[in-house]
């Protein structure tokens, strides 16, 4: 199995490159060809032809809970505030995430394939980070509270700087894995450069949720790696944050610290706190959920009822986003999905501390950043958890092979 070639796995890698890099933005003539859609369809067909369906793999808890969320999303459509909106999001985005998740856990069944896919995701992240920095230098920005925030470059189907930031934040810990893995000084220096590039890209997004997620990712990683050497953990954390703070422009640092300032817009009528309060009312009114991708519609209704006008806002909190859109049942499935991912990470940690520490840091970055960003249905968390699930399956299979016959 280790050396068996798989066209489906190759096509899955190509699909990930296409949705990450989005070459049609660089070369507009590619837009009509719908390369990502065609590649996904071919990957599904070839995966079926290669007979990759493994019943044991499909019993994985992460897969089961994600499948239940998919089913619930469909069942809620007739009762959605805006059914067509839910259908459009499900067909064009959510089902694709599920298919990609399924392909990855079915096809990434050897270490060689896992490493290939990990390298693909990491390389795509670095390339996307370079594009973001170049866009910033070319002044593709908006001004937000005195800070320039890069816009106009899509990464994983979104150009929102908050969405882009969380992608880089979650992949950032992998830089440390690749740095520690390299013995060659040239390649070690190359990955250190990639680390700087990703951090720079996070900074120019101006995303406070991204900044917070980065702090959590670094703290989590350094803690796990140095958990038996507290001094090393404290020293590494101190040095790294001093370096970041030293090179971060003052206006960006002020933007981050404004999260905790009660004069910030988030404490005003149109800010996050008021949105969250109105969300709680929606949960009481519609505990079954208002339908996937309909948070803004529900928010608009609550504002209208309160005699308020203005833009219909997103949740700015992934957990409220899920419970409002998929209801209490969907929220339970979502939490169980995340819990299953953590359980898999701790299983991996028994035999592979380096990779497990990276996954642990990435998950923590998402879980904390999600408190301030609407990222419940973003591509990167499903891609990350599919990698975790794939590696857990590989580790379990290897342990079974080496178990003595009774």
Image (cartoon, grey):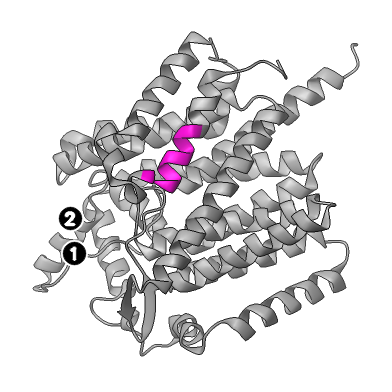
Q: Secondary structure at mark 1?
A: loop
Q: In this orientation, does residue 207 appear?
A: no
Label tally: 2
Q: 73 or 237: nearer the eye?
A: 237
Q: Secondary structure at mark 2?
A: helix
User: For this view, does 98 lie left or right of residue 274?
Assistant: right
Quarter of the image that includes the C terminus: top right
- State the mark number for residue 297: 2
Q: Position of residue 30 (x, y in %)?
A: 30, 39
Residue at 49 percent across and 84 percent down: it is 257
Q: Quadrant of the N terminus?
A: top right
Residue receiving disc 1: 312
Does residue 320 appear anywhere in the picture?
yes
Magenta range: 14-23
As displayed, is residue 326 above or below residue 321?
above
In terms of sequence position, does the residue under pointer 1 or pointer 2 come before the other? Answer: 2
What residue is at 27 percent from the left and 46 percent from the top?
289
Find out whether residue 326 is within the magenta segment: no
């Amino acid at each position: 199995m280790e050396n068996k070639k798989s066209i489906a796995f190759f096509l899955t890698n190509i699909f990930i490159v296409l949705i990450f890099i989005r070459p049609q933005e660089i070369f507009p003539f590619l837009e009509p060809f719908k390369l990502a859609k065609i590649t996904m369809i071919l990957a599904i067909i070839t995966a079926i032809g290669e007979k990759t369906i493994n019943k044991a793999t499909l019993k994985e808890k992460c897969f089961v809970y994600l499948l239940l969320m998919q089913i619930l999303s469909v069942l809620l459509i007739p009762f959605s505030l805006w059914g067509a909106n839910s259908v459009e999001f499900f067909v064009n985005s959510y089902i694709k995430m599920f298919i990609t998740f399924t392909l990855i856990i079915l096809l990434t069944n050897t270490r060689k394939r896992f490493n290939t896919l990990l390298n693909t995701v990491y390389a795509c992240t670095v390339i996307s980070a370079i594009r973001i920095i170049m866009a910033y230098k070319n002044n593709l920005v908006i001004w937000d509270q005195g800070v320039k925030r890069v816009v106009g470059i899509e990464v994983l189907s979104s150009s929102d700087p908050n969405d882009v930031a969380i992608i880089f934040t979650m992949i950032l810990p992998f830089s440390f894995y690749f740095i520690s893995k390299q013995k060659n000084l040239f390649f070690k220096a190359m990955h250190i450069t990639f680390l700087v590039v990703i951090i720079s890209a996070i900074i120019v997004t101006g995303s406070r949720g991204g900044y917070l997620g980065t702090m959590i990712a670094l703290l989590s990683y350094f803690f796990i790696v140095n958990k038996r050497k507290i001094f090393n953990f404290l020293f590494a954390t101190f040095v790294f944050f001093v370096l970041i703070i030293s090179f971060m422009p003052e206006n960006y640092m002020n933007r981050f610290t404004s999260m905790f300032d009660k004069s910030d817009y988030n404490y005003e009528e149109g800010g996050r706190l008021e949105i969250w309060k109105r969300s709680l009312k929606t949960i009481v009114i519609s505990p079954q959920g208002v339908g996937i991708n309909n948070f803004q519609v529900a928010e608009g209704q609550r504002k209208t009822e309160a005699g308020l006008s203005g833009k219909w806002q997103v949740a700015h909190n992934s957990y409220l986003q899920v419970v409002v859109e998929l209801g209490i049942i969907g929220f339970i499935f979502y939490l169980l999905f995340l819990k299953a991912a953590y359980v898999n990470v701790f299983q991996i940690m028994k035999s592979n501390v380096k990779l497990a520490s990276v996954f642990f840091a990435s998950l923590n970055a998402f879980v904390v950043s999600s408190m301030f960003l609407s990222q419940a249905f973003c591509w990167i968390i499903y891609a990350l958890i599919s990698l975790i699930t794939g590696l857990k399956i590989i580790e379990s299979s290897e342990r079974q092979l080496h178990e003595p016959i009774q």
